[in-house]
Amino acid sequence: MVKACIFDLDGVIVDTAKYHFIAWRRLANSLGFDFSEEENEKLKGVSRMESLNLILQWGGVEKTEAEKLALTDLKNGWYREYILKMGPEEILEGVVPFLDHLEGLGIRMAVGSSSKNASTILSQIGLTPRFEAVIDGNRITRSKPDPQVFEMGARAMGLPSGECIVFEDAEKGVDAALAGGFLAVGVGSEENLSHAHYVLPNFIGVSLQNILDGIKAKMP
Ligand code: B16
Ligand code: MG
């Protein structure tokens, strides 16, 4: 019996991945190297510092902890310039009708994001009041693929993980949902997310029943 849905933010509700990519690339370029869109996929759902560590590794660049902190601050400043210009028009197509649909069914809703900017983004796009709990990068101590962010979301609603569906665009986010015993729905390409219980390309025209049928059909 599904009682709640927990949404990842970046890549599920809004496409902030493009802003992360621009800002990280600007940082890499300032250090004298570049990285590809393919490599960028590996940064999805990963914390800010872990993302920097991966990027520095790709560029073969070493930095002290203090320098790394300064670099993440620099990147976050650039990233925030983009997100502070966001508005409700950046909500991905199909998301608002799907939230309305869930609300009509009495399904509870929370956000589980690795981003420390999650509350800023939700407020910019006007969706803060739609979620009963928002667990973000400021509240967790372990990053995805650890299930902590989703477990805290379920706990905030007083529900066991088995009664919640997690929606995720990142491979590591789907890993986190599965590790926590949630129903995991990938949002994006089947190619990256085939380990989820079900994969949707996006929320356009989607109903909870479609998802439950899809999960059932994919289960052994
Ligand atoms: P910030 P999600 C994640 O958000 C992003 O996918 C990931 O690319 C980013 O590095 C991470 O948040 C941290 O973001 O620098 O804003 O704290 O997909 O878990 O909502
Ligand atoms: Mg994401």
Image (cartoon, grey):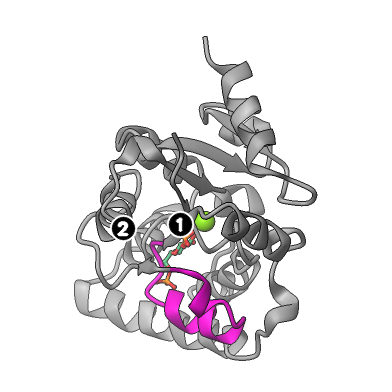
Give the residue at x 65% y 31%: 191
Question: In the figure, residue 193 lies in which quadrant?
Answer: top right
> For mark 2, what is the residue?
157
Relative depth, front residue between 10 and 63: 10
Question: In the figure, residue 91 lies in which quadrant?
Answer: bottom right
Relative depth, front residue between 32 and 215: 215
Task: Give the residues in magenta.
Answer: 112-131
The relative height of residue 37 versus residue 100 in the rendered view (above or below) is above
Relative depth, front residue between 150 and 31: 150
The relative height of residue 168 versus residue 195 in the rendered view (above or below) is below
Query: x%, y% of residue 80?
Result: 52, 86
The relative height of residue 105 versus residue 90 in the rendered view (above or below) is above
- Tell me if I can see residue 44 in this picture: no
Query: x%, y% of residue 39?
Result: 56, 49
Membership of 185 in magenta stretch: no
Query: What is the number of the mark on residue 108?
Result: 1
User: In the image, is 8 to the left or to the right of 132?
Assistant: right
Query: x%, y% of residue 146?
Result: 28, 45
Question: In the figure, residue 64 lies in which quadrant?
Answer: bottom left
Label 2 CB, ligand 1: below 8 Å? no
Q: Is label 2 in a helix, a strand or a loop?
A: loop
Query: x%, y% of residue 95?
Result: 68, 61
Rendering quadrant holding ligand 1: bottom left
Q: Residue furthest top?
A: 220
Query: What is the number of the mark on residue 64?
Result: none
Which amino acid type is marked by label 1? Answer: Arg
Q: Is label 1 in a helix, a strand or a loop?
A: strand
